[in-house]
Amino acid sequence: MKKFLLSLLMLITAVSVVKAEEITFDPNASTGWTGSQAEQSETKDGVTIHCSDGKATNGQYRFYKNSTATISVASGKITSIKFECTASGTAQYGPGCFENSGEGTYSYDGKTGTWVGSASQVVLTAKTAQVRATSIVVTIAKEGAIAAPVISPKAGTYYETPIEVTITNPNSTGKVYYTLDGTEPTAASTEYAEAISITTNTTVKAVVIDGGKASEVVTAEYVIATPEEVANIAEYLAKEDGAVVKFTNPVTAVYQKGAYLYVVDDSGAALIYGSIGQTYDNGAVIPAGFYGTKTTYNGVVELKNEVGAGNSNASFLASTSSVDPINPTVATVADITKENMNKYFMIPNVTLDAAAKTITDAQGNSVAVYTTHAAIPADGEYDVIGFASMFKENVQFLPIEYVSKVSVDNVAAFRALEVGSIAKLNNPVTVVGVYETTNNYNYFVVDETAGITIYALKSDCPAYQVGDVIPGGFRGKLNEYNGNLQIEAVEDMKESETNAPATPAVYAIEEITADMAASFVRIKDVTISDVNNRNITLNDATGAMSAWNRCDLALPDAAATVTVDGVVNIYKSGETSTVRIIPVTISVTSEDENLQVGEKVEVIPGTGEITVNGADIVDVYDVDGKPRTTTVKGSGDTPKRIVVEGGIYIVVADGEAVKVVVD
């Protein structure tokens, strides 16, 4: 027995510790990331961090959305990379916005993102949003060195049990040994095989041993604590800063945007800040049991969800019930006080000074407004809805909505407003073109005075088709994008009740100018050339102009003569502006005088059947070139005819293609 113990002691003492090296990148001392947003690179002690699109500013390394972060080492292997970020989890700027693109594993915990593995190069992509890191620590295992294990989640105070602790070996060989009693681990300690479940205060120590070499010992101390229970918001507000509280009663959501969640109960109003893993609508009841740390940030009292290192969002449960939506209390500037912090108000009839960032109410009192939840529009008269707040010792108002008192009667009047203005458009507009992205609709619309683009979130407006008439009475904000005016942040958009396609004005290419932006035009006898993805060139007898096939229309053969209906658009590249067309239909021109493009066709009353001046109809297509399923009638001496609903179609009749408008 003594001989065995002596041999074991000799084995343990024979293990030599070979340390890894940590290189810390500090944005405040960065010498590589300089200038404006662009490709950036910095090398320190043999480690290079390269970003395809970013910059270092305000004490942050900024990796812009869709950029790649490439970390490489001249010698040895990277075993871990730790990013300390300005936001938590998958919130914008948080470490959860990174996606691993190669070897190793990447995880995030609160504001910390950690890559673990063994590689000479690591590539991460800011996939979902921008990432902002206040420090980056790269651990390098030199040749022959053993990298220390990584314990997750990180050490700290926890309020949820059990804590499932994992230990990762970043090396390709060796074994992990650990202890739970604070003693130093050796080859005689417990070998790690699966996650360790912790329910009481515990100190975890771990080491990697490979033959006669050992890594440094890493330590993680976990403290299990119990939050103070509060019965309502008033009790919570009475606690000292730093108190971790647990709500035993439900509260009601008022407004949520990003990390900000405003809630109320019968005793008061509160702001919850942080990534909580849930989305609540106005009126949603948030179940009891959630907890956080009471804190004050720049004068604002908030319940911070980050109550301890690595705590999950499990305390915030999905709403299973709701009440009537919470409406703002009508107030004046005099009500915007420290005592009313985080309360939901509507201040009517204010005058906005956009440059000074102030609103003045009907009583002549003023208060500062800030852009936390809504951009400041142009000067004007508004009803303003939002929350009383503070900045250090000064009260301020955080609007979520500016309801303009301005209304206009037509598109030309809307276009004449100052950019940034919010107004109501009283008259209807007709949709002449549509393209959509994953989250947005882009509608080209016209009335009898002018055209404009409506850029809207899909959640904010219905899905319209070409020819739909959008009822008047909707609100929006005038903005300029790449030289084109558009209406954004739309509200009160109603379903179309009619479909009455607008008729474009006919122009030759040489007649189209920049002051016709957003106009609905038709160009006849056109050929298409220089096709480069969506970029094409239109040619007629008077000249050529560029076009952007944004609606992904099917293009005819290069030799075909077509008629193009489209919207005049401006494209800016630096200081250069180009006038171009965004086609909404491209139709082959018929040589038969009786089959003119755009001619209305005969509708047989009471049947839904149409003919094209007595010609046999063979095929029917939608305006985007997709085959249309129809019922074809007629044979022999009876001309073939089709049964369709009202709309615009491409019809092949007597061997020629014609665009038809069906009433």
Image (spheres, rainbow, N blue to C red):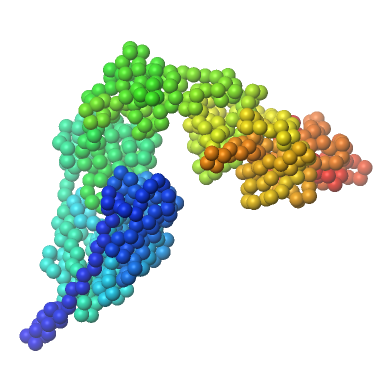
Judged left or right of residue 259, residue 5 is left
- Residue toward you, 493 or 645: 493
Q: On the rendered image, what quadrant is the C terminus found in? A: top right
- Residue toward you, 635 or 15: 15
Q: Specify the quadrant of the image occupied by residue 82.
A: bottom left
Question: Compared with residue 535, is residue 174 higher up or lower down, i.e. above or below?
Answer: below
Kindly tell me whether residue 522 is visible in this rendering. no
Judged left or right of residue 220, residue 107 is right
Extreme residue toward the left, this view = 2
Extreme residue toward the bottom, this view = 3
- Residue toward you, 96 or 74: 74
Q: Residue at x 42, y 53 (%)?
A: 39
The percent position of residue 247, horizontal first and vertical second, equals: 23, 39
The percent position of residue 97, horizontal first and vertical second, equals: 38, 51
The percent position of residue 241, horizontal first and vertical second, equals: 17, 37
* Count of residue discs: 0
